[in-house]
Amino acid sequence: MEYEDIIFTKENRVATIRFNRPQAMNAFSPRMMEEFFHAIADVKTDEETRVLVLAGTGRAFSTGADVKAMVKGRLDQGSVGEGAERQNYALALRNLDKPVIAAINGYAVGGGLDLSLACDIRIASDKAKLAEVFIRRGLIPAMGGIHFLPRLVGLDKACELIWTGDMVDAKEALKIGLVTKVVPHDELDEATNELAEKLAKGPPLAIQAAKRAIYEGLSMTLEETFTYTARIMAGLSQTEDHKEGARAFVEKREPHFKGK
């Protein structure tokens, strides 16, 4: 597929999807979302890719739906793009076992914020601005914000952010748990790549199993979690990666995990 509205690259077992509509603050176009889902499918089936990074060009990570198109009746909040109808990017990311990191370079508002919330880790530039602006359009966060926000920032803060649509800066976002860490703007790509490559060097089977267990565990009792993780541990203990990790510890060297 020829990509136009995203830049899709792979290096050192890390795939990067960079939204590339800077003139529109990386607002979702049907083509951009079609390309996004195509790239996600590629990452999901590529055994060599172990981590996914989402980023934006220009002054924004993404400002969500293209409001101008919405006013003209050309964009429905419920579906995006031919061939990507009814697909939800939050589900696409959560159904991807591999770690997903959002590099928030600037504005992440509305659907753009919801997209970042669906990622496992959010690294923000100190110039980042974040807001759930749906309420200002007479809408609610229907692409994941209602689910993710209370779990990240608590019920009362989620209510405030959703009901007011107020913008928060990177410092406040870090304080309330909306982002994982904040770095100087010029160091965002370096910090993101450093973490992504660190994860890519880790044992992929264990990391992917841990991602599934973390999210499944949110709806389990403690007893259910013990049963679930014990079953996972039994499987992982038979892998070559586990044996390599044990050998590397005894031999006092860095392990080399192959995902087997």
Image: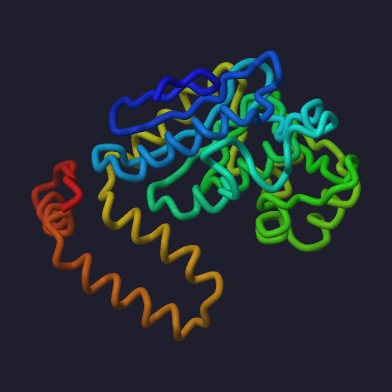
Name the residue at 68% across, 59% down. Answer: 147
Q: Quadrant of the N terminus?
A: top left
Count of labels shown? 0
Picture coordinates of residue 142, whole percent (x, y): 73, 52
> In the rendered image of this protein, does residue 206 appear above or below residue 113?
below
Q: Which residue occupies the foreground of this view, 99 or 68?
A: 68
Vertically, is 79 above or below 104? Answer: below
The percent coordinates of residue 129 (x first, y second) are 75, 31
Where is residue 81? Give x, y as percent: 59, 36
Report the residue at 58% width, 45% height from top: 85
Pinpoint residue 231: horizontal percent, then vertical percent. 29, 77
Foreground residue among 74 and 118: 74
Q: How is the image coloured?
A: rainbow
Q: Residue at x 55, y 21 (%)?
A: 5
Q: Is residue 159 left or right of residue 241?
A: right
Using the image as rendered, state which of residue 176 and residue 9 is in the foreground.
Answer: 9
Which residue shows up at 58% across the image and 24% down it?
A: 56
Q: Inspect this view and state whether residue 170 appears.
A: no
> For residue 256, what is the image quadrant?
top left
Viewer can see residue 40 = yes
